Image (cartoon, grey):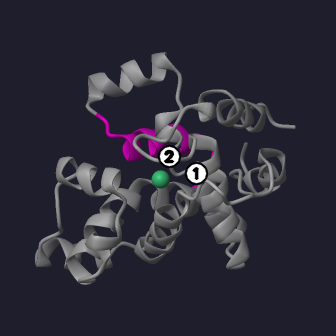
């Protein structure tokens, strides 16, 4: 098994035990639920991987976080920076865009904002708030914006303390299949 696969599984088993900020699930439960929803929708291996790893920016070790702080990176950029060493855009871009996708849905769907969890509505302000019309237009030009929107829908649903999912090992199959070929 590739060492990055072991590393990712270790991160989910380790730091993944921490609560997902302001929610009733752990980081690992949140990741697994998001991936489970993507799997149930018969998504590609790469989108399932993106769903599993979309918040990996919160699970990186302190050294990497320090580096990111120097560069002023947010968790979605941090996740993309980490993942891009091993995965291509089909995995990395939906991860990078999942916060922008929330801002997009707020601008394009009247009911969306009201359905966000309290923590997610709170962080919206820090993330730039609702997208302007100009930002919406620009977002739609991104080749991976639709995958980012799919990921976002599952991300928002993946906060159910009672949902049972397959385990971390189950999803490592998709992660391994999604590695860039030249590794
Ligand atoms: Fe999330």
Bounds of the magenta span?
73-88
Toward the viewer: 4 or 117?
117
- Which secondary structure lies at badge 1? helix
Question: Left or right of 52: which side holds 176?
Answer: right
Which numbered tag is attached to residue 55? 2
Disc 1 C-beta below 8 A from ligand 1? yes
At a point 72% along the width and 65% down the height, the residue shown is 45
Question: Left or right of 125: which side holds 25?
Answer: right
- The residue carrying mark 1 is 30
Q: Residue 80: within the magenta?
A: yes
Which numbered tag is attached to residue 106? none
Q: How crowded is mark 1: few (under 14 residues within 10 Å), some or many (20 or more)?
A: many
At a point 58% along the width and 55% down the height, the residue shown is 88
Q: How crowded is mark 2: few (under 14 residues within 10 Å), some or many (20 or more)?
A: many
Q: Is residue 49 something one can see in this rendering? A: no
- Which secondary structure lies at badge 2? loop
Residue 99 in percent (x, y) is at 35, 57
Q: Earlier in the sequence, mark 2 or mark 1?
A: 1
Q: Residue 106: within the magenta?
A: no
Q: Do tag 2 and tag 1 residues touch (Cβ < 8 Å)? A: yes
Disc 2 C-beta below 8 A from ligand 1? yes
Q: Is residue 5 above or below residue 127?
A: above
Residue 41 in percent (x, y) is at 67, 79
């Amino acid at each position: 098994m590739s060492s990055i696969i072991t590393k990712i599984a270790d991160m989910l088993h380790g730091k993944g035990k921490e609560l997902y900020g302001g929610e009733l699930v752990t980081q690992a439960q949140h990741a697994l639920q998001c991936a489970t929803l993507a799997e149930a929708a018969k998504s590609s291996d790469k989108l399932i991987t993106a769903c599993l790893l979309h918040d990996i920016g919160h699970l990186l070790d302190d050294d990497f976080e320090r580096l990111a702080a120097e560069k002023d990176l947010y968790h979605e950029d941090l996740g993309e920076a980490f993942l891009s060493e091993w995965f291509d855009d089909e995995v990395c871009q939906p991860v990078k865009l999942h916060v922008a996708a929330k801002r997009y849905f707020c601008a394009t769907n009247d009911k969306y904002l009201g359905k966000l969890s309290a923590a997610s509505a709170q962080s919206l302000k820090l993330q730039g708030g609702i997208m302007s019309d100009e930002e919406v237009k620009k977002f739609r030009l991104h080749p991976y914006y639709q995958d980012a929107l799919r990921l976002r829908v599952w991300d928002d649903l993946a906060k159910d303390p009672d949902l049972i999912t397959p385990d971390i090992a189950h999803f490592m199959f998709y992660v391994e299949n999604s590695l860039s070929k030249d590794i």
